Image (tube, rainbow, N blue to C red):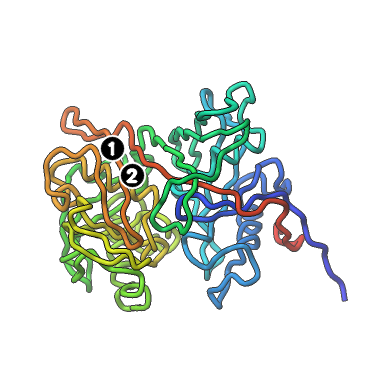
């Protein structure tokens, strides 16, 4: 019986925000996987353990959820004024597919710490104590992220007392600035149709008022009530209802078409990561998935979002940018759910608790743009060393 040896590839397993992923230096990848294409996708699929018809990722590093089926490739930046190039791959669970169409805002918080620890930042720019400013080029969408990474005794500080709902233990706070985060490369504008509210017709499902925005990540927002929800839903109420999931996917697909992200509705199947579909509601009391009560008085609105076909257990970082941006623009469904008016910062309730995020927007000649979105996350190295994959994984 013949066999091939396993490859040993240097890698770091990291938590960033409410997500986990396998981080690689570009130069450490097998040569065929150092460029975009089938060899790279095949390698990352094997690392994560996809496709897995059992939906468990038993034979890989993935965690069988959208939040834990992620890979990141980093290199010294090729873009002037930046420290590191950051490329993110969302790995499908039950199909042989890696989606490169958007960013992961949560894992963005782990990029700066990894870059510092792995020699991708000029040592002369790294303070012994305080904060190291890491300028990140987000290669998926061509945008800049600035991470302010805490340092202690010349090393990244990972422990601390910053609490992030959706993460069990406190850690050090990492403020993130998403500069010019309108993801308008495909859609052409922050509001792709030029309107703050559209009517979206979805055959066989219904007609819905929606706000479609490309900020952080392309997202379509609906009123919770129009979907038969109240905005306090947890994963158990959504993720086991196949008929409901199919209706939500149909809405997402038709929104993708209206936003100019795909050429026909069938194309949504090969663009699972974007756009996101989310719903919003005015504040209500509810109990988060941890059992902690969330009071209506403590939030400006409620928000829930789908990720890779399932309700996210907390909130994606990129969707948080979309929420903050849409909330700052009077007339959107998100702004209305938050009570209307000018809102540079909002606190929203999600399935795991609450999150505060801000956005700076402006309107020039009738066109809305966002100059910056700000939020805090945390990150931590969980394991470092090598991942092993069969040699044939890269073809």
Q: Position of residue 277 (x, y in %)?
A: 31, 59
Query: Which quadrant of the structure image shows residue 274?
Result: bottom left
Q: Residues under labels 2 and 1: Cα distance?
A: 7 Å
Q: Position of residue 1 (x, y in %)?
A: 87, 76
Mark 2 or mark 1: whose residue is earlier in sequence: 2
Number of numbered callouts drawn = 2
Q: Residue at x 22, y 58 (%)?
A: 280
Seen as rendered, the residue at the extreme right is 1
Tag 1: Cα neighbours inside 10 Å, few (<14), some, or many (≥20)? many
Q: Residue at x 25, y 50 (%)?
A: 212
- The residue pinned by badge 1 equals 359
Picture layout, residue 258 above or below residue 249: above
Seen as rendered, the residue at the extreme top is 124
Tag 2: Cα neighbours inside 10 Å, few (<14), some, or many (≥20)? many
Picture layout, residue 139 above or below residue 60: above
Q: Position of residue 247 (x, y in %)?
A: 28, 71
- CB within 8 Å, label 2 to label 1: yes
Q: Which mark is residue 55?
A: none
- The residue pinned by badge 2 equals 321
Comparing 394 with 286, the one in front is 286
In the picture, which quadrant includes the C terminus? bottom right
| Left or right of 196 in this view: 64 | right
Query: Which quadrant of the structure image shows residue 272?
Result: bottom left
Query: Which quadrant of the structure image shows residue 18?
Result: bottom left
| Left or right of 128 in this view: 196 | left
Q: Position of residue 171 (x, y in %)?
A: 49, 47
- Under tag 1, what secondary structure? strand
Picture layout, residue 192 above or below residue 148: below
Q: Residue at x 20, y 42 (%)?
A: 194
- Under tag 2, what secondary structure? helix
């Amino acid at each position: 019986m013949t066999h091939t040896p396993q490859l040993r590839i240097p890698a770091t397993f990291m938590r960033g925000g409410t997500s986990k992923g396998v981080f690689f230096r570009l130069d450490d990848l097998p040569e065929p996987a150092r460029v975009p294409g089938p060899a790279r996708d095949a390698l990352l699929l094997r690392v994560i353990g996809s496709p897995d018809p059992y939906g468990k990722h038993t034979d890989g590093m993935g965690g069988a959820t959208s939040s834990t089926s992620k890979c990141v490739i980093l290199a010294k930046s090729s873009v002037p004024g930046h420290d590191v190039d950051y490329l993110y791959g969302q790995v499908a669970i039950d199909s042989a597919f890696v989606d490169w169409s958007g960013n992961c805002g949560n894992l963005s918080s782990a990029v700066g710490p990894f870059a510092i620890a792995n020699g991708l930042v000029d040592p002369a720019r790294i303070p012994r104590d305080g904060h190291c400013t890491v300028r990140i080029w987000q290669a998926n969408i061509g945008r800049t992220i600035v991470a302010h990474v805490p340092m202690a005794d010349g090393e990244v500080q990972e422990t601390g007392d910053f609490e992030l709902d959706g993460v069990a233990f406190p850690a050090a706070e990492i403020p993130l600035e998403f500069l010019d985060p309108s993801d308008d490369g495909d859609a052409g504008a922050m509001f792709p149709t030029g309107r703050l509210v559209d009517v979206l017709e979805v055959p066989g499902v219904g007609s819905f008022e929606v706000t479609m925005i490309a900020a952080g990540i392309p997202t379509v927002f609906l009123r919770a009530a129009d979907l038969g929800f109240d905005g306090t839903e947890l994963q158990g109420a959504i993720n086991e209802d196949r008929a409901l999931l199919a209706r939500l996917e149909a809405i997402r697909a038709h929104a993708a078409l209206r936003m100019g992200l795909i050429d026909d509705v069938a194309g949504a199947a090969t663009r699972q990561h974007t756009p996101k579909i989310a719903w919003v509601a005015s504040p209500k009391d509810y109990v988060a998935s941890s059992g902690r009560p969330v009071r209506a008085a403590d939030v400006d609105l409620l928000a829930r979002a789908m990720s890779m076909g399932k309700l996210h257990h907390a909130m994606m970082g990129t969707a948080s940018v979309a929420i903050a941006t849409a909330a700052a623009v009077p007339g959107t469904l998100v702004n209305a759910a938050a009570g209307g008016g000018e809102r540079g910062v909002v606190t929203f309730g999600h399935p795991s608790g609450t999150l505060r995020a801000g956005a700076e927007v402006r309107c020039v000649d009738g066109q809305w743009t966002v100059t910056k979105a700000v939020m805090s996350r945390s990150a931590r190295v969980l394991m470092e060393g090598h991942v092993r994959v069969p040699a044939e994984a890269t073809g």
